[in-house]
Amino acid sequence: MAAIKGPWKTVAGPGGTTVPFYVIRFDKRGVCTSPASLAHLVDAAADATDVFLFSHGWNNDWAAATRRYDQFITQFTRSHAAHWHPETRPFRPVLVGVHWPSTVLVMQDEQGPDIAAGTASDQDPEEAVPVDLLAEDLTPDQAARLYELAEREELRGQDALDFAALLVPVLTGRDDETGTGEEVTPDAADLVALWSTIPDGDTDPPPERGGFAPDASDDTTAGPQTAGWLDKLNPRNVIRSATVLLMKDRAGRVGAAGVRTMLHGILAASEESRVHLVGHSYGAKVVLSALAHGSAPSRQVESVLLLQPATSAKCFADASGGNRAGGYRPALERSKQPIMTTFSRHDAPLTKLFHFAARRASDKREAVIAGAPSEYAALGGFGPQDTSSVTVVDARTAPHRYDLPTTEVLAIRADDVISGHGDVQNAATAWALLCQVME
């Protein structure tokens, strides 16, 4: 099949118009794999009044990513028709969705048979874990040892340390959210101690792709393992935790490389167009990395909307009292409007699991410590921390508009409108974007 060299498709726009919808692909290094479509997009952006750049999060294959984009666009179109028609200014939108390789969890209908010693009836395809992803850069001998340990029901003592040591190179990466920018290499013993505290109940898989992890209610989320790591370690939990860091790094790399280049090109194509960034889960890290990394673009984007972002709650932190500035603080001055970001106590992955997995250094394990969120708490679970540049408001629904504050961040307490990590394609989130567009 010939490569697409223009919009992926067109969607219905206001007043019977059609709107081009591009999907631009990037590989795991952030290299654009659809350059002809990208060039076509930049040309189209030059004549647009508004360019909407969306990024999906972790564990979205092509079908899931495009389905979620379609769902959100449908919600926005309905909100636009009901509350901003006719428009109070010219409105010729162009839509672009990023597609990056974020899939790590294999669903039952997407994998081949598991060739192992057990019979087919012994195997649960839903329990597949992405060992291949973690073994990509290991030597053959190291990979063989990783596969052997990964098939164990549990790991103890030296085997647990060996497993962690094999994953140390995979998990070495840069701390770009909390401001150090340093490459951090984890310690194998620290990793084992951390992994022993990860909740050890296997929750049901998500009904569809698209989340940081499966949503779980309070009564289904298991507590930490009670046994010490010398007694038992669940390799399945280890692999899932390791992929959190792996995909976190990938989201930042894709954003800081390819998506940043695309964003700068779109902004340079026209001095008049309003560029709106929208990211969900790790997609928030993609768009923030694109905006904050390196030198500033030629001009500001108009707005940024982060939906249940799977990034550090301290990514916008002030540089005060001996604290480092958050790694994404440059994004605040590169957006004309205050950055909008949602957080919800119903987001189980970001309030119960993120702080266990998305870190490399030793720290206390609780989500909330002495009344304050953990050093590694998620922005989408607890809202921005350690910043004076934030205004917190309850979520609003149409026709009640958000009053844009003088602070640089508008944190939306979304408990009443977001029921879980993946519940972001709804009327309330579309209304938040429309409020930015109408401003």
Image (tube, grey):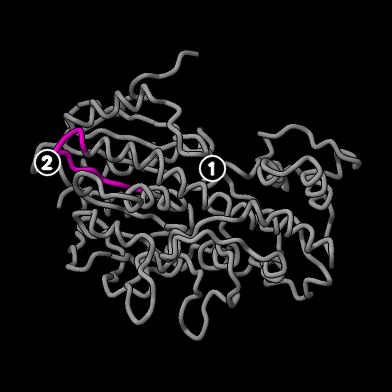
Please state the horizontal and vertical placement of residue 317, each as a whole percent of the image.
35, 70
Pointer 1 with pointer 2, Cβ within 8 A: no
Instruction: Give the left or right position of residue 275, taking residue 279 as reference.
Output: left
Q: Hey, which residue is sitting farthest bottom in the picture?
A: 370
Based on the picture, tell me whether residue 271 belongs to the magenta stretch.
yes
Please state the horizontal and vertical placement of residue 189, each as a whole percent of the image.
72, 69
Q: Which mark is residue 147?
A: none
Q: Residues within 10 Å of mark 2 (few under 14, many from 20)?
A: few
Please say whether residue 65 is visible from this viewpoint. Answer: no
Front-most of residues 269 and 99: 269
Rendered residue at 38%/36% (across/down): 97
Based on the picture, tell me whether residue 388 belongs to the magenta stretch.
no
Please state the horizontal and vertical placement of residue 375, each as a whole percent of the image.
49, 73
Q: Amino acid at mark 1?
A: Ser
Residue range corresponding to the magenta coloring: 268-278
Q: Hey, which residue is sitting farthest left in the picture?
A: 88
Q: CA distance from mark 1 to mark 2?
A: 37 Å
Which is more N-terminal, label 2 or label 1? 2
In the structure shown, which secondary structural element does the residue marked by tag 2 occupy?
Answer: loop
Q: Hey, which residue is sitting farthest front in the picture?
A: 182
Question: Which residue, given by chain and number where applicable, does mark 1 sit on?
Answer: 102
Q: Hey, which residue is sitting farthest top in the picture?
A: 2
Q: Amino acid at mark 2?
A: Glu
Instruction: Give the left or right position of residue 341, taking residue 224 as reference.
Output: left
Instruction: Give the left or right position of residue 394, taking residue 49 as reference.
Output: right
Please say whether residue 291 is visible from this viewpoint. Answer: yes
In the structure shown, which secondary structural element does the residue marked by tag 1 occupy?
Answer: loop
Rendered residue at 35%/66% (across/down): 316
Q: Is residue 131 above or below residue 18?
A: below
Question: Which residue, given by chain and number where applicable, does mark 2 sit on?
Answer: 87
